[in-house]
Image (tube, rainbow, N blue to C red):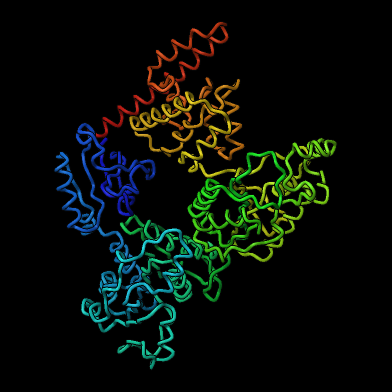
Amino acid sequence: MGKIAIYGAGQAGRMVLKWLPGHQEAVCFLDRDPAKQGKNIDGVPVCAPEELTAAEWESLTEVVIAVMKREAAEEITADLRGLGFRNKVTGITSFRDTQDVRLAVLRLYAQQIREKKVPGAVAELGVFRGDFSEEINREFPDRQLFLFDTFEGFDAADIAAEDQKTAQHPYGGRMDFSGTDIESVRARLPHPKQAVFVKGRFPESLGQFENPSDSSADLPDSPAALPEQFALVSLDVDLYEPTRQGLEWFWPRLAQGGIILIHDYAGTQYPGVKRAADEFCHKRNLHLLPLPDLHGTAVLMKQGGVPGESGEDEAGTEKPAASVRRIVLMRHGEREHSHESRYVGRTDDPLTEHGAFQAYLSGKWLAENMPSVGKIYASPIPRCVRTANEAGRAMGFAPEEIEHVDGLQEVYLGEWENKTRAEMLETDPERVRERESHLGSFVFPGGESFIAGGARLMNTINALRARTEGDFLVVTHAGVLRGYLALLRQVDADQKMDDLPPCAGMIILEDSSADAMPRIAREPFAPEERLDDEEELGRLYTKYGTPEPVIRHMRKVAQTAEDIMRRSAYNGDRLRPVRAAMVHDLLRAQPDHERAGAAALIKEGYRELATIVALHNDENIDVSGDGLTAAEILYLADKLSAGDRSVTLEERFEKSRAKCVTPEALAHHEARYRKARAIQDKVERLARREDSAAK
């Protein structure tokens, strides 16, 4: 297998990673930006060029330079040679010049539009210097080309909106799009007489057609009115609001069989583009096709045929999305005094900074996996407000877009509010015992019960269901969630009260208009990405009393797992086995520690990892498949690590064999050795296969 490094851990580098054929393995990203170093992109580490050893440089068959500017690529090539790299260096600029995916798609669709006689003009919203406009004009010499742009760079109002909508701010001095004007674009067009330039912020600039005398207009050759239909539209506006506005305006005017090309949809620089497109498509039950080009273009096509088919009604407008939608219930993040045995209901106990980070990661998970969430509701209690704000920031919501709803507040604890359990045992021991034997139905003196709080939450969510379209997020509290989930599952709230989301964890409901109540589509969980954070790992180690030698062992197992994946060219999620390794012995001191650790991970919201951890010492683990599983990787890595050092299987099992004092124990020991040996043989077989393919 050929081993390559990708120089540049930005958007272009990520796209190069997706281009690689199966016989090539990206072993690392090289980047001189300290903010990127030490991170992983799809399981591939990012490091500085100087971190590679001479042997590692020698093992590379190729370095791909993932930067767009030729001058920069030439400097990087000289840098690589200076560092001693003598093998192949490839620049993506040569690929772009000879194999421009977006341009090829434009030409193919232009041919199809002509063959199918799709009616309408063509257009580009976001022209800049006219590179793509020129190609559109060349492919459609007989159609009017409408070119919409400020021709002065980003509009200040759109930048302000982007500040509120996304947590990333890519624009600024280095992304200046003001260096253009209408005449310079016109001069490069092969058929300039077909061009209609519309200057100004979109869609306000459309007013020029209603009032041609508007002084801001520059339409010397414009028609009296805009066309009724468009056959092809290019959207290249980089930001959320103009992307949303462009889709809202052009889609109803797109002819059946016509397409919209959305630039930067799958890119990393402009997250607002993807969010706007995903929201638009989700509401209309439409589907985008991403392209593997350097800028992450996606294609949106209006299906041809009889009006009323393919998601449109007889007027050519979109049918509503399917009736099933999703509701996300999120618990607030970690509180400052959550470690105390204290009755906290509506008391203002603020989030820790780690709790805020938990909320942000959950919001990031939603942004990546459920971009269709269009509304956030939160309890007005400050810890929920901040949780919603942090999650919303990752999802592109401004704080003022989040609605605070009184019905989402925590259970009212009345006279017990903010009292410790020790205080209540001293003053009212009988009621403490009553409460602990009737968790759901116990009514706090002067307050309410968990089940009453759950009923209140149910009524509030039902009201939100009635007035909200599409998917939405609810940020609330543990107590009311206990009561609500007991009602939803139809179980005795006094007996079943433990299956809750962890701090900033989530439950996903599916809601159909045909059902009286939503159903649980995904049980409580937390994003696994939390375990990439040392603070979250430290929290778990402290909470469960994991000794330092065991922590060192788990780190060693994680390193060994990475070695196994590298050697076997494992093509699954490379982060999952590492995360499982970092928590597999969380409760090592307990009997049956594998099951105990798995149970703790389920409680923490890491259900998929719990399944892997439960098998890490199980002689019944399935090793029959041709490829490796995450569970097999952890199983073998654990057996190749003794404490914080590497050992052979024979060393590891010879030492533990002495502890087997009964025939039954020895039989189990031998069974585990055979399974570990079988996995190691599989790794060696896969490694030989990859080495053979590389030759």
> Is 149 displayed left or right of 88 in the figure?
right
Q: Is residue 403 above or below residue 31?
A: below
> Is 511 displayed left or right of 662 in the figure?
right
> Is 114 displayed left or right of 487 in the figure?
left
Residue 173: % across, % down: 31, 66
Taking the image as drawn, is residue 635 in sight?
yes
Q: Quadrant of the N terminus?
A: top left
Taking the image as drawn, is residue 624 in sight?
no
Number of numbered discs overlaid on the protein picture: 0
Nearer to me, 76 or 99 = 76
Residue reaching furthest bottom? Answer: 213
Residue reaching furthest right? Answer: 430
Residue 229: % across, % down: 42, 78
Q: Quadrant of the C terminus?
A: top left
Q: Residue at x 43, y 38 (%)?
A: 575
Q: Residue at x 57, y 22 (%)?
A: 589
Q: Quadrant of residue 556?
A: top left
Residue 574: % across, % down: 41, 37
Nearer to me, 152 or 186 = 152
Q: Residue at x 76, y 52 (%)?
A: 412
Q: Residue at x 80, y 51 (%)?
A: 447
Nearer to me, 173 or 200 = 173
Q: Quadrant of residue 515?
A: bottom right
Q: Is residue 283 above or below residue 65?
A: below
